[in-house]
């Protein structure tokens, strides 16, 4: 992800679906004008690149955006995201206000940091990829994880459940990745959850030793569990 300055603006070409311009708070109006002048469909923001906004209100000036990628910021008001009716990729890290995902029905890829205030993520019908981060509910159950049944690729990073119980049946899911799920003991039930799984990767989850379900996944072509491929 090489971010470089092109003239007066930061740009990146390989982040998400489309080239993006960096939003810098010190010249935010100029950034918005440049996005619109070039017809860009993506923006990114990070404090280390001059992004200091605490709301997403600036998005009203770029309603054509397909993707928003903001990390390490501190976002209090997210309402500006609803101005993006064609939004396909969502990544807004470290926010205190919940999002009603039913107002973003065209999302294809969500990078979702666990936020109990969020609603309707599981109802999205166009979502192909969901990457879940820091999922640590008090229930320690994936029953509280809002995974849409439409997903083809599911990634779960830093989660606290012991089993996969609670995940919905995901008949379209072809790839599952589990990373840093340090409480996870078992993959039991995976053949029911994702019967058409083709790719399974499990890393940094050393307690996950019950992997018998792997043998019951008829379409599985690639498996990597912790230290070595599983044949």
Image: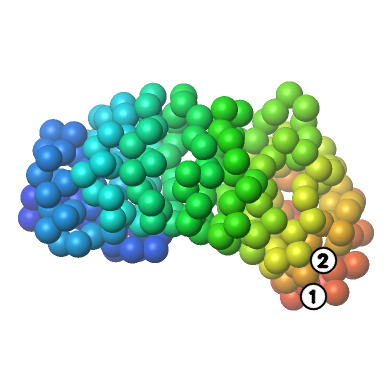
In front here: 147 or 176? 147
Question: Where residue 101 sits: x, y (%)?
Answer: 52, 42
Which residue is located at x 65 percent, y 60 percent? 150
Quarter of the image with the N terminus is bottom left
In the rendered structure, the answer to whether residue 77 lies left or right of residue 209 reads left
Dot label at residue 201:
none
Which residue is located at x 8 percent, y 55 percent? 7
Give the secondary structure at mark 1: loop
Q: Which residue is mark 2?
A: 195
Q: Is residue 117 above or below residue 50?
A: above
Which residue is located at x 67 percent, y 42 percent? 146
In the rendered structure, the answer to whether residue 32 lies left or right of residue 154 reads left
Which residue is located at x 77 percent, y 31 percent? 140
Quarter of the image with the C terminus is bottom right
Asked whether the residues under the numbered discs 1 and 2 touch, taking CB atoms below 8 Å apart as contact, a structural biologist would say yes
Q: Is residue 53 above or below residue 180?
A: above
Give the secondary structure at mark 2: loop
Q: Kindly tell me whether residue 24 is visible in this rendering.
A: yes
Among the 4 quarters of the image, the one containing residue 226 = bottom right
In front here: 106 or 215? 106
Q: Which residue is mark 1?
A: 219
Identify the mark nearer the N-term, 1 or 2: 2
In the rendered structure, the answer to whether residue 38 lies left or right of residue 18 reads left
Q: Kindly tell me whether residue 224 is visible in this rendering.
A: no
In front here: 113 or 180? 113
Q: Is residue 8 above or below residue 129?
A: above
């Amino acid at each position: 992800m090489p971010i470089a300055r092109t003239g007066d603006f930061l740009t990146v070409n390989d982040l998400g679906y489309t080239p993006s311009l960096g939003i810098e708070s010190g010249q935010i109006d100029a950034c918005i004008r440049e996005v619109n002048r070039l017809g860009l469909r993506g923006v990114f923001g990070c404090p280390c690149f001059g992004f200091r906004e605490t709301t997403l209100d600036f998005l009203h000036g770029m309603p054509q955006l397909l993707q928003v990628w903001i990390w390490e910021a501190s976002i209090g008001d997210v309402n500006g995201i609803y101005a993006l009716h064609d939004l396909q990729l969502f990544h807004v890290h470290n926010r205190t206000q919940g999002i009603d995902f039913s107002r973003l029905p065209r999302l294809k890829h969500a990078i979702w940091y666990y936020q109990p205030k969020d609603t309707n993520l599981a109802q999205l019908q166009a979502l192909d990829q969901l990457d879940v981060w820091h999922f640590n509910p008090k229930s320690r159950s994936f029953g509280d994880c809002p995974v849409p049944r439409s997903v083809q690729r599911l990634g779960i990073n830093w989660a606290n459940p012991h089993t996969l119980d609670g995940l919905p049946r995901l008949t379209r899911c072809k790839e599952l990745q589990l990373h840093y799920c340090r409480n996870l003991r078992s993959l039991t039930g995976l053949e029911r959850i994702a019967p058409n799984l083709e790719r399974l990767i499990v890393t940094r989850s050393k307690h996950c030793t019950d992997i018998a379900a792997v043998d019951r996944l008829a379409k599985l072509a690639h498996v990597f569990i912790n230290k070595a491929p599983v044949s």
